[in-house]
Image: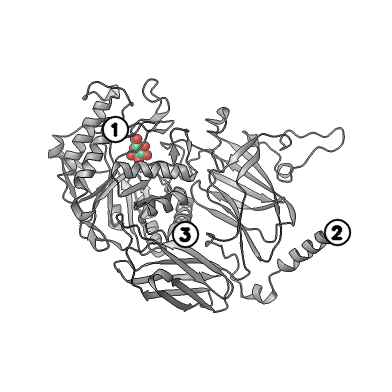
């Protein structure tokens, strides 16, 4: 009986997995399935077997086929046989003490069963692998990916087998000059399959992607598109039942259909983070999403949300749960970080310095937090290397591709503290143009730290500003830069009539270490507290200031920070300690935010 069942299963699989000739002719080849949410999925999370391959010396062919010794004289030194395991998702640094500083290769193996069914297309999705990887299924190379913080996928329809399948991923986190970020960065170099892995199924003709948002500056006009994987023109229906909205649009021979329609919607805002269920369906496929609608734009030196000026009461944080000293990956991690932000009095979060998990973005949006999201083009990038623009654009496309329907995101940021140069200006200007084509609805920014000084004046003259909607300055008055005058007498000037965010400011303090408020080298809470009071005094004198973002919410791990008594591998600029305890400066910002909460009505 079992044999008959197996024969039927195998026959069904090969019949069903053959997309009909007609469909093959009409299908747009290599169309990624970006619309993966709410589809039938098989999680591959859990324990994966691993091989440490520090010198990258493992025999690739033997490892990816999980070769075993044969006969009496054969042996293998790199094998999954009886190997240890690591949890996926999760960085390896915080899972095993000996891997705390590990930079090199780890081979991961996952055995899984797959049972063919009526779905005809199957995709293997990785939400994040740090930093580069090669992916093999049943001994076949599926492809490679570079970049720790954005999702990627492979169609595996023709590589899957009924029953047992062997998935092997080679992960390497070595820092390199031509990487993004490059060889040195002020956060921990976590390695591993740090976010979820899933198999997603779709019909032969599927809804590949969609973009449904309000047209920039409009409170009623929806603008966007639906993209199918078939060139055969067909209707796609977009429905927002709660708003009584429904429209049918026809796809063209590229599979794309444009959406332009009016709808009466309750707008998303920090006070009312309204999300609507949106259904999109065709003759063969249906997808659902929870989408908020709001308008964000700049008007002179103001940032406008739903046509009203808004001041961004922000905080930055890394994707790290300090208590576990590991990269955040779980829903609970996102909730902790965002609850800390709400408690501080924020309406805005800067996800530093890279796209954080999709669940953090979705939860922030549900909690009424506006979001700044950026790619890790951080300080010493080799802009003269022609590969950098394509790598940075790939990360931009993957970030915008994943989060374009997330109304909480109001700003895409291109880089952090990159020194002005011809190559840097050309690269970032090109990226700004590219991201505006990808998404015309959001604001573009980039955090910089090069200014012109004249006594107590700070002038913003970075030429990159021409390409930005919002200027963003990282300025550590009182820490890396002594005060040029009384804080309240510092004058900020700008060559550009655009809104300014102070995207980073702050200084270090060791929680529970008390003493002098005027000596930086003692790492006292009092010093940090006074520094924050002084910065608040300066902010009140900047007429075109529309937001501030203290650096940073909680102490975080960094190999830059090795002072034996006060740091021990932790950057202590947190308003919270690495255990989540409030330092005295936390109360300065909380008080400042509570006082300004009344302005702009938000
Ligand atoms: C820089 C940088 C941060 C860094 C911070 C610091 O501005 O953007 O990534 O952690 O300063 O020096 O602590």
- Say which quarter of the image contains residue 25: bottom right
Instruction: Name the residue carrying label 3.
Output: 401
Quick check: can you spot residue 102? yes
Q: CA distance from mark 3 to mark 1?
A: 35 Å
Residue 601 in picture, x, y percent from top left: 21, 55
Which of marks 1 and 3 precedes in the sequence? Answer: 3
- Say which quarter of the image contains residue 86: top right
Q: Residues within 10 Å of mark 2 (few under 14, many from 20)?
A: few
Q: Nearer the viewer, residue 156 or 324?
A: 324
Q: Residue furthest right?
A: 72
Q: Is residue 469 above or below residue 338?
A: below
Q: Is residue 51 above or below residue 225?
A: above
Image point 33% across, 26% down: which residue? 510
Which of marks 1 and 2 precedes in the sequence? Answer: 2
Return the mark for residue 1. 2
Q: Is residue 538 above or below residue 243?
A: above
Quick check: can you spot residue 380? no
Return the mark for residue 507. 1
Residue 352 in picture, x, y percent from top left: 39, 44
Look at the numbered disc 3 and say if its residue's Cβ is closer than 8 Å to ligand 1. no
Q: CA distance from mark 2 to mark 1?
A: 71 Å
The residue mark sitting in front, 3 or 2, is: 2
Do labels 3 and 2 touch, CB within 8 Å?
no
Residue 384 in picture, x, y percent from top left: 43, 48
Q: Nearer the viewer, residue 581 or 569?
A: 581
Q: Secondary structure at mark 2?
A: loop
Horizontal arrangement in the rendering, residue 358 relative to residue 536 (left or right): right
In what quadrant of the picture does the N terminus appear?
bottom right
């Amino acid at each position: 009986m079992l044999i008959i069942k197996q024969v039927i299963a195998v026959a069904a699989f090969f019949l069903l997995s053959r997309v009909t000739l007609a469909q093959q002719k009409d299908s747009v080849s290599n169309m990624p399935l970006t619309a993966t949410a709410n589809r039938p999925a098989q999680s591959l999370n859990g324990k994966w077997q691993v091989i440490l391959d520090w010198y990258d010396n493992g025999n690739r062919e033997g490892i990816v086929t999980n070769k075993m010794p044969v006969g009496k004289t054969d042996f293998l030194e790199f094998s999954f046989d009886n190997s240890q395991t690591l949890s996926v998702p999760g960085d390896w640094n915080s899972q095993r003490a000996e891997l705390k500083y590990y930079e090199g290769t780890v081979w991961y193996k996952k055995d899984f069963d797959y049972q063919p069914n009526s779905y005809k297309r199957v995709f293997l999705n990785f939400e994040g692998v740090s930093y580069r990887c090669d992916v093999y299924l049943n001994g076949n190379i599926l492809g490679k990916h570079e970049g720790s913080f954005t999702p990627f996928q492979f169609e595996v329809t023709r590589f899957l087998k009924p029953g047992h399948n062997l998935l092997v991923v080679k992960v390497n986190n070595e820092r390199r000059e031509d990487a993004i970020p490059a060889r040195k960065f002020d956060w921990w170099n976590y390695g591993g399959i740090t976010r979820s892995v899933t198999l997603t199924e779709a019909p032969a003709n599927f809804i590949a992607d969609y973009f449904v948002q309000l047209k920039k500056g409009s409170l009623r006009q929806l603008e966007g598109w639906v993209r199918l994987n078939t060139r055969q023109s067909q209707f796609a229906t977009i429905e927002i039942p709660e708003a009584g909205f429904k429209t049918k649009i026809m796809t063209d021979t590229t599979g794309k259909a444009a959406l332009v329609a009016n709808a009466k919607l309750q707008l998303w805002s920090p006070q009312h983070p309204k999300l609507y269920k949106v259904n999109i369906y065709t003759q063969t496929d249906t997808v659902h999403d929870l989408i908020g609608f709001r308008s964000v734009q700049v008007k002179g030196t103001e940032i406008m949300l739903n046509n009203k000026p808004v001041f961004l009461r922000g905080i930055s944080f890394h994707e790290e749960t300090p208590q576990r000293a590991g990269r955040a990956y779980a829903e609970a991690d996102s909730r902790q970080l965002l609850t800390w932000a709400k408690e501080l009095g924020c309406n805005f979060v800067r996800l530093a310095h890279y796209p954080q998990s999709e669940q953090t973005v979705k939860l922030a949006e549900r909690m009424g937090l506006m979001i700044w999201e950026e790619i890790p083009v951080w300080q010493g990038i080799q802009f003269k290397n022609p590969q950098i623009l394509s790598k940075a654009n790939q990360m931009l496309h993957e970030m915008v591709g994943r989060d374009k329907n997330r109304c909480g995101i109001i700003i895409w940021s291109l880089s952090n503290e990159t020194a002005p140069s011809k190559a840097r200006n050309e690269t970032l200007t090109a990226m700004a143009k590219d991201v505006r084509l990808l998404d015309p609805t959001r604001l573009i920014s980039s955090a910089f730290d090069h200014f012109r000084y004249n006594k107590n004046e700070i002038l913003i003259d970075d030429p990159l500003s021409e390409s930005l909607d919002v200027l963003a300055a990282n300025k550590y008055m009182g820490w890396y830069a002594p005060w040029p005058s009384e804080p309240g007498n510092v004058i900020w000037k700008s060559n550009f009539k655009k809104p300014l965010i102070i995207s980073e400011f702050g200084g270090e303090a060791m929680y529970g270490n008390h003493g002098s408020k005027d000596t930086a080298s003692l790492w006292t809470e009092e010093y940090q507290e006074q520094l924050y009071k002084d910065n608040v005094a300066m902010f009140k004198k900047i007429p075109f200031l529309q937001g501030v973002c203290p650096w940073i919410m909680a102490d975080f791990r960094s190999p830059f920070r090795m002072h034996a008594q006060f740091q021990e591998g932790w950057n202590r600029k947190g308003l919270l300690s690495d255990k989540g305890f409030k330092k005295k400066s936390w109360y300065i910002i909380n008080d400042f935010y509570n006082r300004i909460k009344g302005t702009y009505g938000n």
